[in-house]
Amino acid sequence: MKKALLAMLGLLALALGGCSTDGGESITAVGSSALQPLVEAAAEQYQTEHTGVFINVQGGGSGTGLSQIQEGAVEIGNSDLFAEQKSGIRAHKLVDHRVAVVGITPIVNPKVGVKNLTMVQLRRIFTGEITNWREVGGKNAPIVLVNRAQGSGTRATFEQWVLKGRQPKAAQEQDSTGMVRSIVASTPGAISYVAFSYVDDTVKAVALDGVTPTDAHVASNAWPIWSYEHMYTKGPPTGLTKRFLAYIQRPATQRKLVQKMGYIPITSMQVDRDATGKVTRR
Amino acid sequence: MDPIREAMLHPSRSARLERRGKLISFLCIALIVLVVVAIFAFVAWHGLATFFENKINLWDFLSKSVWSPAVKDAHGNPEVGALPMIVGSFGVTFLSAIVATPIAVGAAIFMTEISPRWGSKVLQPVIELLVGIPSVVYGFIGLSVVVPVIRHVFGGTGFGILAGTFVLFVMILPTVTSMAVDALKAVPRHYREASLALGGTRWQTIYRVVLRAGMPGILTGVVFGMARAFGEALAVQMVIGNASLLPQNLVSPASTLTSVLTSGIGNTVMGSLENNALWSLALLLLLMSLAFNLVIRWIGKKGEMK
């Protein structure tokens, strides 16, 4: 009995010991689930190229990322939103590192029969003024709104650029993009919004004012619904954090990895946009 | 020194062992109590901040129906009306309990009175198996089977209280059934024999004697099931639609306390109103499960067989 206990303790110690990095550097990045796949892939690639470092990537949502970095609990806080847009965050203490751009497009159930909407129509759909697809040139079918959860980065971006301060109609909410897509695909008359990389054959992406949702249109800002993916640090980054951020932002990573993972490289953007939404050519 | 005197004056080995055992078991219970108190304190601390720090009126919180903590209404007050979630939670809980209870009681009667051998050989393992299925599996089946069927039959999106009720019904059925079985098994054999000796038929014995005597146990099972339904998050969240709207009917999207909590907590910042409001929902949930526990104890006391 005693022996078994000792053996178990030994195993536990071994397991715990395995987590430490034998004197190597280790950092943790927490937050946005939309950005998580990219950071994970980049971390994996970085760790194979530089031995002896450990980069721990976790999800949890943009709110978690920002509050954790504000408290200094982690080295990097991932967010879909500018820190200024989130209440309860003292943004001036955080340093923003933009690592990618994500375009967001409205998607509809393919049977709706609508390929193009104007921005005003889209706004009126999400505020509940237009309730039937007939009113925008589609079939006679009621519109079913599907939202992301309140506070989600995708939703905040969509509402910032589409609703322009108007209040959305309360409707059903889903807390993941995958779920949104499968509901839109299976529910007649459904409309929602997802990041470009999630669009597939089961749903139909809608053009806005004749502009199609493509990476090129985001780069030129012809397609206005997009957001930066931010990696925040508390104060200027140092050590491994600094090297890792530089690694993600360098052109080679942007061109290959970022594009491969379905994000738009920050280097291909022709415009800059700040937290208040002001756009400048670069 | 005299060995007998020695033994009398000092605690024996077994006495020391007993004291040590007492200490260890006391430490275990102290740890549990400490954890429970800490959880209560933590949830209450954050949950009450909504009312004290952010100055939200408690009555508004319970009675208003617009849930949008990030947005301020015409008077500059944040919109934190939890009524849709409260209605949704109670709706799915009571409806699933109403549907599950008769079936559970019927199954329990079959297993204890009508065919005990078949019941213990086949039905008991099946029910125990059902208890062990993870809730995400129920949710997934609900999403891919129940929701489309409801959409097909009733129209709309298929998401709503009805879908939540179906999923929860299947989830709590085994709990309620196995507790009802225990309650009926606990009815003493001589009750049945007395009833039969008086000339009661089998049905009269079951209906007038066994069910009567087992009622407190059955009710405890139902409340247990309701507590489980009330606290269930994942499966319900997948099928209820998560719209913070007062449900107009059983097939319009609704939400529960748990579904709003799980979908919102990662997107809020600790200490902000949005976050505090979610903690208030968690506090409400905690208080409700406490209430369910008290009800169970009350039934147990009230219904003791004398």
Image (cartoon, grey):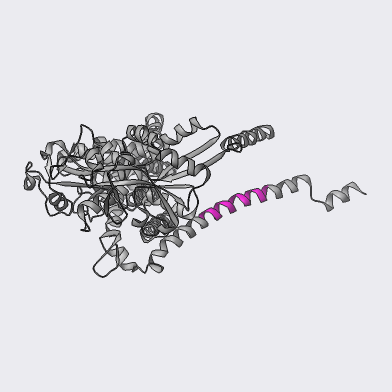
Where residue A235 sits in the image (x, y, percent)? Answer: 48, 53
- Camera sees residue A127: yes
Residue at 11 percent of width and 51 percent of height: A130
Q: Is residue A186 magenta?
A: no
Quick one: B225 or A258, which is closer to the camera? A258
Q: Say which of B172 and B80 sits in front.
A: B80
| Membership of B26 in magenta stretch | yes
State left or right for residue B69 relative to residue A146: right
User: At x 32% / y 34%, what residue is drawn?
Assistant: A259
Q: Residue furthest right?
A: B1
Q: Is the residue A255 above or below the residue A274 in the image?
A: above
Observer-nearest of A187 and B161: A187
Please provide the residue range marked out in magenta.
B21-36
Counting every numbered tag in the picture gives 0
Q: For this view, does B10 lie left or right of residue B217?
A: right
Residue B57 rendering spot, x and y as whole percentages = 33, 69
| Image location (x, y in percent) of residue A60 | 40, 46
Left or right? Give the position of A229 relative to B35.
Answer: left
> Does any portion of residue B200 appear in the rendered image?
no
Question: What type of secondary structure mainly makes up the magenta span?
Answer: helix
Q: Position of residue A74 (x, y in %)?
A: 49, 48
Quadrant of the drawing holding the C terminus of chain B: bottom left
